[in-house]
Amino acid sequence: MADTYDYDLIVIGSGPGGYVAAIRAAQLGLKTACAEGRETLGGTCLNVGCIPSKALLHSSQLYEEAHSGALTKFGIDLSGVALNLDQMHAEKAKAVKELTGGIEFLFKKNKVDWLKGYATFEGPNAINVAGKSVTAKNIIIATGSSVTPLPGVEVDNDAGVIVDSTGALALPKVPQHLVVIGGGVIGLELGSVWRRLGAKVTVVEYLDQILPGMDEEIRRESAKIFKKQGFDIRTGTKVTGATVANGKATLTVEPAKGGEASTIEADAVLVSIGRRPNTEGLGLDKVGLATNKQGQVETDHDFRTKVPSIWAIGDVIPGPMLAHKAEDEGIAAAENIAGQTGIVNHDVIPSVVYTYPEIAGVGLSEEQAKEKGHDIKVGKFPFMANSRAKTNRDTDGFVKVIADAKNDRVLGVWIISSLAGTLIAEATLAMEFGATSEDIAYTCHAHPTHAEAIKEAAMAVQGKPIHI
Ligand code: FAD
Ligand code: NAI
């Protein structure tokens, strides 16, 4: 228990990293507080990230299915389907409220104190929140990240023309033409929402391919599917400026490698070129901490910074900016602070793009595996040959299993499928347990399920799938 300090642990930030760390620390008997400046707990993820975006992805998918006539072939004739966007936003807000309120309940249940306000360091064991000094034996920085600005393209969420992800989650009407700057996860997810609701969506991506960091084959196939859905994807293109007049934006674009400039008119523009760590105003200088070139706080394997009483987790430290990565780091850091051994296996962190179909991966891409010097074997299986996907008329995508040719250890699994986000859990578990492709191939999978495609892709590593 805290003696000379007010708390054993103060966590700064209540996102999935911070709130999970606080709860685990309290479970382990530490007197814990969490400082949060937002009006509700849950951070980016619950308030303006994962949760509201998934709510709109779900409802817009239902709308498109009902409205587009896609259900007619199943004998479901729907006429007069109409969009009530205000209700769609209201249902999203309800989900957010329930979940953020849920964290407040969990804090009370676990006796975690919520220090309301933005924290600034006063020293290695002290912060100031809302003018009050509070001390702790250990402090975790879990301040998360914010949108990376694009010079020359000024975001104004209130005006609603050039917006960031927060603005794009709350557009009051469907834009006729939405231009998304950045063909990454946010651009494709939120671009999907507004395309399904009726917008023409143009994606301007600086690189030659969308979805950087993913397996090349997956990136190519995804682009093909998105184009088929009506996305206008302009890769190798950069936005150099924007003007807004009469509620419309004019963007100046040019080829990324140089060339003639042209303009694109849009009713709404989403700036989604990445996120950057939140350290401004935190007073890191007061405790002798500096950020690295990417603006991140560096830690050791245990999530401790070079100041022994200060730890850091989540989007503010290096690694993928993902809620589940932040959560696992929160648990590990709390366990380490409590004297236990908290570990995160950063080699096995799944990532999912919640478009339709979903795109998911865990471990190495084919390119990364080769770069790392692995001699590899690849097995692939298309959903076109999976009986459940065929029955559901849901055959886009494939599973790709990458295994080490010498010892058959699975190095990476990539999936495009309506259920990829759920299916990737099997691959993640297999990799965490050090599975070989043969282990997956000889595991009984229920029939008929999409999961059988993972088994078949694993069988394909040995060149012996049954159904193709
Ligand atoms: P955050 O969630 O950013 O929380 C940090 C909190 O700290 C904030 O509430 C902030 O107010 C608070 N804070 C900052 N500074 C201070 C201070 N000085 N004092 C007190 N409080 C402070 N990830 C996924 O895994 N799956 C998804 O589906 C997904 N969807 C996303 C959709 C969108 C539109 C966005 C923007 C992000 C999405 N992400 C998703 C990413 C995910 O939200 C982040 O990776 C995750 O929230 C990081 O958690 P965190 O705890 O590190 O920080
Ligand atoms: P991102 O890094 O995924 O994509 C940004 C894209 O913008 C890249 O393709 C990049 O090449 C491109 N880009 C950069 N500068 C550009 C420019 N000037 N012009 C045109 N294109 C440019 O970042 P995004 O989509 O903003 O998401 C931020 C983070 O949030 C991601 O790291 C992601 O991990 C997380 N997130 C995760 C989700 C999920 O797990 N489903 C959903 C949404 C966000």
Image: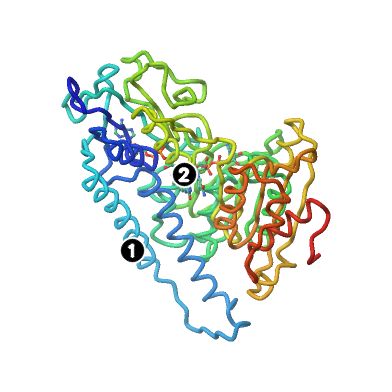
Q: Position of residue 183 (x, y in %)?
A: 60, 46
Q: Give the residue number, with chain letter if any, for mark 2.
A: 324
Q: Rounded to the nearest whole Å, what is the CA distance between mark 2 and mark 1? A: 26 Å
Using the image as rendered, state which of residue 448 and residue 93 is in the foreground.
Answer: 448
Q: Amino acid at mark 1?
A: Ala
Q: Residue at x 35, y 68 (%)?
A: 87
Q: Is mark 2 within 8 Å of ligand 1?
A: yes
Q: Quadrant of the N terminus?
A: top left
State left or right for residue 312 relative to residue 418. left
Q: Residue at x 69, y 61 (%)?
A: 453
**Disc 2 to disc 1: CB gap under 8 Å:** no
Q: Residue at x 42, y 16 (%)?
A: 306
**Nearer-the-camera pick, 444 or 277:** 444
The answer to whether residue 466 is above or below residue 206 is: below
Along the line of sight, the residue nearer the viewer: 290 or 383: 383
Q: Amino acid at mark 2?
A: His
Estimate the x, y position of residue 45 in percent, counting from the top left.
40, 46
Q: Earlier in the sequence, mark 2 or mark 1?
A: 1
* Protein image colouring: rainbow
Displayed quadrant of residue 92: bottom left
Residue 75 appears in the figure: yes
Please tell me in which quadrant of the rendered image residue 311 appears. Answer: top left
Q: Identify the secondary structure beneath mark 2.
A: helix
Disc 1 designates what residue?
90
Q: Secondary structure at mark 1?
A: helix
Q: Quadrant of residue 433?
A: top right
